[in-house]
Image: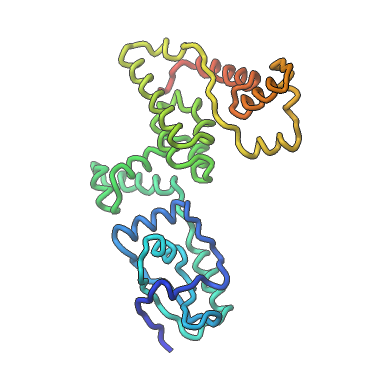
Amino acid sequence: MDDQFKNIPIELVVDPWILLRPVAKGSIEYLEMKTSIEEIGLLSAIVVRLSSRKPGKYEVIDGMYRISCMRDLYKTEIPCIIKEGITDDQVLAIQIQANAIRKETTPSQYAKQLKRIQKAKPGITIRQIASMINKEPYWIKNQLGLLRLNKELRLAVDRGEICLGNAYMLSKLPSVLREDFIDPAKLMPNKEFHALVAAAIKNFKEAVKDGKMEAFFETEFKPQAYLRSLKDIQEELNSHSVAGLVMTTANCKTVLDGWIEALKWALHIDTRSVDEQEHKARQRSRKKWKGA
């Protein structure tokens, strides 16, 4: 029997009996798809079959990301291609085939594709590119800005080690300042990191304007507090490998002293961490502002 096509109430569509590819609602892919559907609608139907486990319902074969977006956008109907006589094994085979060719696009891949558009069309503006792909100009600027990051940093962004919001801000920093902000970019919330970077950029521009670049890089060292990774904290909780050294170095004499030093260690502002920060800062300072 030929496939049928019709709009089906979303409440009648259920998830597949085996979900081969869980929906990552925090992923770039999902957020981009949701925005696209909200702005221009769903461009392709999902594939379903009559459910043998829930009479009167339709089971998704392919299209979980699309229907999840539609549900989140409170849509009431979704266009469906209804497959007849599909077995469980065939459903699994279709899902494997679909996911084998569908890979999540990374931020670096987006940026590289946008750069290709620029090279292929010399003189094209950000606004024109935005119009071509139905995106806001600020999104285009942010994506292209990622190309200012080195290969290692772009890989960290693609892996999710640095969230996109922090990556965008990191890319706006002059290259000479960027290294100081890598660890905070990985660990600080976006709002706090945004404020930190904005202040650094403002100071840098003022130093350039006033001809005080040398002074800018030779100011008194100030340690930066940023939270250690959950993995490091959990490892220390289990192993106590640095506790004794941290408290001895700080000459802790009371339980309160130890508690305060533990909090400082978690924020990278204990004595040893500050010494490490200062050492790295002095090394970078000796390089002056070459490449800024």
Q: Is residue 234 left or right of residue 145?
A: right
Coordinates of residue 173 in the picture (x, y in percent)? 41, 28
Coordinates of residue 289 in the picture (x, y in percent)? 43, 18
- The quadrant of the picture occupied by the N terminus is bottom left
Quarter location, residue 79: bottom left
Quarter location, residue 206: top left
Coordinates of residue 33 in the picture (x, y in percent)? 39, 58
Name the residue nearer the viewer: 188 or 206: 188
Quarter location, residue 277: top right
Name the residue nearer the viewer: 270 or 147: 270
Q: In this view, does 137 lie above or below 224?
A: below
Instruction: Identify the residue at image location x=57%, y=32%.
Output: 227
Instruction: Identify the residue at image location x=51%, y=80%.
Output: 51
Coordinates of residue 217 in the picture (x, y in percent)? 45, 14
Instruction: Identify the residue at image location x=36%, y=15%.
Output: 207
Q: In this view, does 212 lie above or below 43?
A: above
The image's colouring method is rainbow
- In the rendered image, is residue 272 in sight? yes
Q: In this view, does 190 lie above or below 245?
A: below
Q: In this view, does 112 lie to the left or right of 256?
A: left
- In the rendered image, is residue 246 in sight? no
Q: In this view, does 16 lie above or below 265?
A: below
Q: Is residue 28 left or right of residue 207?
A: right
Extreme-bottom residue of the structure: 1
- Give the number of callouts: 0
Instruction: Identify the residue at image location x=55%, y=80%.
Output: 53
- The quadrant of the picture occupied by the C terminus is top left
Q: Is residue 35 left or right of residue 180?
A: left
